[in-house]
Amino acid sequence: MITLTPRRTPAESDLSPDLRGRGYRLAMALSRARGAPLAIFWSLVVAILVLPIALFLLVAFSPRLLSQGPQWISLTGFREALSGPLLHAALDSLMVGILSAAAATTIGFATAWLVLRTDVPARGLWTGGMFALLLAPSYLVALGWERLLEPSGVLDIIGIGAGTVRHSFYGPVGIVVVLTTKGVPFAYLAISNALRGLGEELEMAVRVHGGRARDAGRIVVSLLAPAVWSALAIVFAESISDFGVAATLANDAHFPIATFTLYNAVDNFPINFPVAAAIGWILMTMAGLALACQSRALRGRCYRVIGGRTRPARRQRLHAPARAAALAGLSLLLLVGLGIPAFGALSASLIKDLGSLASSHGLTLSNYRRALDSPALREPLLFSARLAAITATLTTVVGAVSARVLADRSSRLSARVLDLLLLTAVALPGIVFAAGYIFTYNLPAANALGLHLYETTTLLVLAYLATALPATARVLLGPFGQVQHSLGEAGRVHGDGSGAAWVRTVLPVLIRPLLSAWILTYCATLLELPVSQLLYPPNHPPISVGITKALANYDFGGGTAMEVIAILFALAVVAVAWGLFALIAPAGWRKLGRSR
Amino acid sequence: MTVRRRRRAITTSSAAVAASLLAAACGSSSPTRAATAAATSSAAVPLTVYSAQGYDSKVTAAFTEATGIKVKLDDDSTGPLLTKIAAERNNPQWGLLWVDGDTAFAALDKQGQLLDYSPPVTLNAPGRALVPADHSYVPVSTTVMAALIYNAAKVSAVPTSYQDLLTAPYKGKVGMNDPSQSGPTYPFIAGLMDQLGGTANGVRAGEAYLTRLKANGLQVFPTNGDTLHALETGQIDYGLIQSSAATGEVAKSTVSAAFEPRIVYLPKSTLLPGVIGIDKAAPPAEQAEAKRFIQYVLSPAGQHVMQTGDPTGDSLYWPVVPGITAVSGLPAFPSRYQRIDPYFWGPLEGQVNTFFDTNIK
C-alpha cells in the first residue's frame, strides 16, 4: 500500500526545529496545492455551467430579477409552456428523443461490434464515416433530405415521383431518421471506446465453462452497460436539445419541437425569456429522467475491466452472408446519414438552379469562386478554426477530469452532481447558454468585480467549452470508467511519481479516446451557430454566422458552398490529427486499444 | 492566515492564472464598452452598431472613413439582435440599432431605452409619415409589406385586392411567411387588420380574413427565402413577401418557359421602414457619434453606399430623403400605402402570432 501522506523519517527528526518546521510547511503547502486542480475544475464548472444555466432558468420564476418583466415571482412562463402548442411541442420532443436514442444506440452498438470485433471489410471507412457523421451539422443533414424530396427537387428532376415518401418523411418519421443518424456516432464513440478496452478474457472464461457464444455475448453486453446507458442518455439529451432539425425539417413539416419553440420565444419579437426558461426547465426535467434511468440501471455494480493483464480481443470471421448483410447495413447507414446530405449540399452548391423550375440544371463552380473570393469566408473560417482548436484542447482536458470525477466511486456525491449538471447542459439548446452568458457576464456586478468578458473572444471560447463539455465528458466516461486504479498504482510501485505513472501507464490506454474527443469537439465547434450568433465579438464573426447570413440573404448556392468548404477544412484537420498520431505517437500507444 | 483561507487563495490565484492564460490564448480582447469608457477619454469611445442590414458593413466602413469614428459592428439577423438587447437590459452594450420594422422600436421606446433625436433633414411624405411623435427613432429608408410575387409563366389571374385571394382561382396557390419567424410579416398582418377593421375591430376582422384565406388553401413558410423557394419549386404560384425580397428575386431570376416572376402591390401596402434608434444608456460621446451616423446615413453619400452595398437585397428600398432616386429596377412606389401605429399594434404582436400559430400555420 502506498501512502501519499508525507512521513517524517528518522533523519528528519534529527534536523533543527527551524528546518523541520520549514519542511513541514512545504509538505503541507504541497499537500494543499494538490487539491487546487480539483478546486479550479469545480470553479470552472460553476463559472461556465452553473451560473449561466441557473440565471437563465431563474427567469422562469422571477422575470424581474434580470429585467425581463415586472413580476418578482411569477409562474406565467410555465403556464404558457405547459399549454397549447408549446406543450404539444414538448411531448413531440419526448417522443422523438426516446425513439432516436433507442435506434441510435442499437445501430451504434452494432457498428462498433462489427468494426472492432469482426473482420468486416473496409473498417477504416466505417470508422471514418462515424467522424464524418459528426462533422455534418444536423441542419445540413435535414436540408440534404429536403433537397432530395422537395417539389422540383432531385427526385422530381430525375423523374422519380417522391410524393409518398415526401409525405411521410416531412414529419416525425423523417425527424427520427435524421436525429438517429446524428446520434449514431455518439453511441458508436461511447460504446467503441469501451469495447476497445474490453479484452476477451471474460468471454473465454464463459466458453471454457461451457457457455455458448450467445452467453458470452450477454456477458459482453452486461459489461458494456455503462457505455450503453451513457449512449442512450447522451443521444436522448442531444436529440431533445437539437436545434438544426427542429429549425429545418420539423419547422417545414409544421411539426413543433420544444427546442424550436424555445428559440422562437427568445429570437422573435416580442422576446419572452420567462417562457423560454420554462421550456428549458421542461427539457432539463426530461434529461433528468434519462439520468435517473441510467443511474437506476447501474446502481451498485462495478464495471472496471481494464487492467494490466487486459489483452486485445481477436476478430471473429464473418461468413459470407453475414458479411454481405453487415456491408449492406453499414453502407445504408452512411448513405442515409452522409450520402444524401452530402449530395444535397453538393448539388445545391454545384448545380445551377437546382430546386427551381428552370429547364436546365448545368454544373457551375461560380458559387465556390464567390465563396473563396469573399472576405466573409476567409477571415471567419480562420477565426473559427483557431477558436475550435483552443476549445477542443480545453474541452479534452476538462472533459478528462470530468470523466475521472464521474467514474470515481469514492466521490459519489460530486459524481452525481456533475453528472446531473452535464446532462442538464446537454439537454439545453445552445441559445440557452448564450443568453445565460449575457445575463451572467454582462451584469453590472460582474463589471464591478473587474470581469469584462462580454463581447470578448474569451467568453465565446468559454461558452463553446460549456456546450462541448457535456458530450465530451460522457464520451470519455466509458473508457475512464474501465481503468482500474491498479494500473496507475503499478506504475508507482515501479518508482514513478503519480504524474509520471499516469502518463506511462494510463495515458497510453486512453490516448485514442482522448484524441477522438479532441476531434469531436473541434468539428462540433467549427460550425457551432447559436452561441456564436449571440456571443461573437463585434467585427469578428465566426464562419457559421457568415454562412447563416448568406442563407438569410437567399444566397443558397454561396452559403452552401461555404458550408462545404468549412466541412472539407474540418476533414483535413481530422486527417492531420490522426496522421500525426500515426507518425509521432510511440508504438505502444498506437498498439493499445486496437483489435488484433 | 488559516488553512482554509490559504487554500482559497491558492484556488483563486490559480483560477486567475488559468483565465489569463485562456485570454492570452484566444488573443482576446476587445474589452467591453464599460471598460473602454472607464479607461479612455469620452471622445475615443467606439460606436457599437447592432445592425441587420445587408449593406451595414459597407456603410460603417464608409462612415469611419468619412468621420474617423471607429465602429464596432455586430451584424446579424433582427431576431438575435433583439435577443441580445433584451438580455443586456441590465447593462446595455449597444450604441445604435438598425433594423427593418418599427414595432420593436416602439416597444424599446415604451421601456425607456431610446434616446429622442430629430436629425436636421427634411424627409419626403412616406418618410414623414413614419416619424414617431416623440422622435424616439429615425426612419432612414422604407420597403413595403407585402409585395405579391407570382409566377406569370404558370398563372394568368392577377389579383387586385386582398379579397380576390379568397376566391377559387387562388385556391391552394397562395403562400406567405410565418409571423413568428419572419420579422416583416407581423407588420403586414397588422396592416391588414388595420385596414379591415381599424384599431377598434381590426384584430377580429383580420383573424376572420386569415381564417378564410387558410380555408382557401393558404400555405405558410418560415421566411421570405422559404416562400420564394416554394414559388420557384411550384409549391405555390403567389407569394406575399417583403418588397425588397420580391424585387431581388425578379432581378436575379432568369425568365424561362416555366418561371417568370412578376410583382403586384395590393392596396393598401403597409410601410416597413428601415429604422435607427439610439441607446439612451450609452455614454454621451457614443450618443453624439450615433447622431452623426444617422446624419451620414441620410446624406447623399450615405444613401449611395446603402443603394450599392447589397444590390439584390436590402439596397432595393425606396428612399425617404428628397432628391435621392430609388435604384433602377425598383418599381414605382405603391400609390396606395399606409403606416400602422407601432405603439398600438406592437403590443398585440404576441397575441396575433399565437392566433396564427394555433389556427393558420
Image (cartoon, coloured by chain):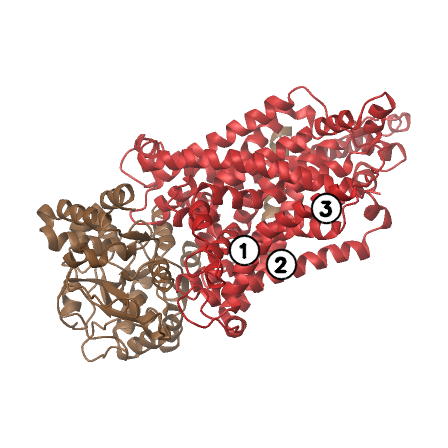
Chain colours: A red, B brown
Q: For mark 2, what is the residue?
A: A570
Secondary element under disc 2, as helix, strand or loop, is helix
Q: Amino acid at mark 3?
A: Ala
Do callouts 3 and 1 mark residues in contact (Cβ within 8 Å)? Answer: no
Say above or below: A348 vs A404. below
* Res. A158 in view: yes
- Looking at the picture, tell me which residue is in the foreground, A495 or A75: A75
Which residue is rendered at x = 47% and y = 38% of the image?
A: A53
Secondary element under disc 3, as helix, strand or loop, is helix
Q: For mark 3, what is the residue?
A: A324
Q: Amino acid at mark 2?
A: Ala
Which residue is rendered at x = 38% and y = 39% of the image?
A: A276
Give the tally of numbered discs. Answer: 3
- Looking at the picture, tell me which residue is in the foreground, A267 or B203: B203
Q: For mark 1, what is the residue?
A: A527
Mark 3 vs 1, N-terminal side = 3
Mark 3 vs 2, N-terminal side = 3
Say above or below: A87 vs A270. above
Q: Is residue A444 left or right of residue A506?
A: left
In front of the other: label 3 or label 2? 3
- What chain is tagged by disc 2? A
